[in-house]
Amino acid sequence: MKSVKFLTFIAVLLFSQYALRAQSGAETSVKEVIQNLFKGMELGDSAMVHQAFAKQVTMATAYRDKSNTPILKRESSIDDFLRAVGTSHPQTWYEEIWNVQVQIDGDFAQVWCDYAFYGGKTFSHCGIDAFHLHNGKDGWKIFHLADTRRNEGCVIPQEIQKRHQ
């Protein structure tokens, strides 16, 4: 009886380690998609950015207008975003992220992080990015991206601020 309990314990332990490694590998893959998105923005490479997204994507931005009215802007295409990334602009776009939280259940992932956006050395805005990703035949792809935007009340880590001075 003791040997059955011991073998059961060992089996559970081994399965748990396998599951943790699989989760860790999936988390790394999900983070790579997000990092490649921002690297593509930095390089002005719309093809690289496009690779991060699924075929059908929704995007939303929550912000306040000049009269402080809450606005939710929705888009059902990333075409304008890709065009903006790929169009030559005088400053490099940097989207710096921190406090990255990844949750995964099977082939669905959710990523939540703080961000600050810079055009070259100039701060533009900050907020929260919220990504939803699906793991399909082409790997992890973003199918929904929502963010908040503000340019006041931003608490940006010192190391990020120093990179853009």
Image (tube, grey):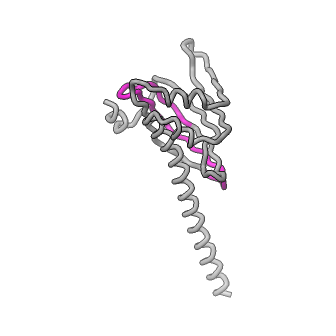
x, y (%) of residue 16?
59, 68
Q: Is residue 145 magenta?
A: no
Could you tell me what secondary structure mostly forms the magenta stretch?
A: strand
Q: Using the image, determine if residue 35 lies above or below residue 60.
A: below
Give the x, y percent position of residue 139: 61, 52
User: 137 left or right of 44?
Assistant: right
Residue 74 as seen in the image, left or right of residue 120: right
**Residue located 58% across and 68% down the image:** 18
Question: Which residue is at 57% across, 16% downward?
Answer: 65
Which part of the image, by quadrant, shows the C terminus? top left
From the viewer's side, name the closer residue of 51 and 126: 51
111 within the magenta span: yes
Residue 3, x across and y down, in percent: 64, 87
Q: Quadrant of residue 141?
A: top right
Q: Position of residue 14 (x, y in %)?
A: 58, 73
Q: Seen from this angle, which residue lies furthest top?
A: 67
> From the image, which quarter does the N terminus lie in?
bottom right
The span shown in magenta is: 104-129
- 87 or 70, nearer to the observer: 87
Q: Quadrant of residue 26?
A: bottom right
Residue at left 56%, top 12%?
67
Q: Image point 50% across, 24% down: which residue?
A: 150
Q: Image quarter for residue 60?
A: top right
Q: Nearer the viewer, residue 38 or 157?
A: 38
Q: Is residue 25 above or below residue 39?
A: below
Number of numbered tags placed on the structure image: 0
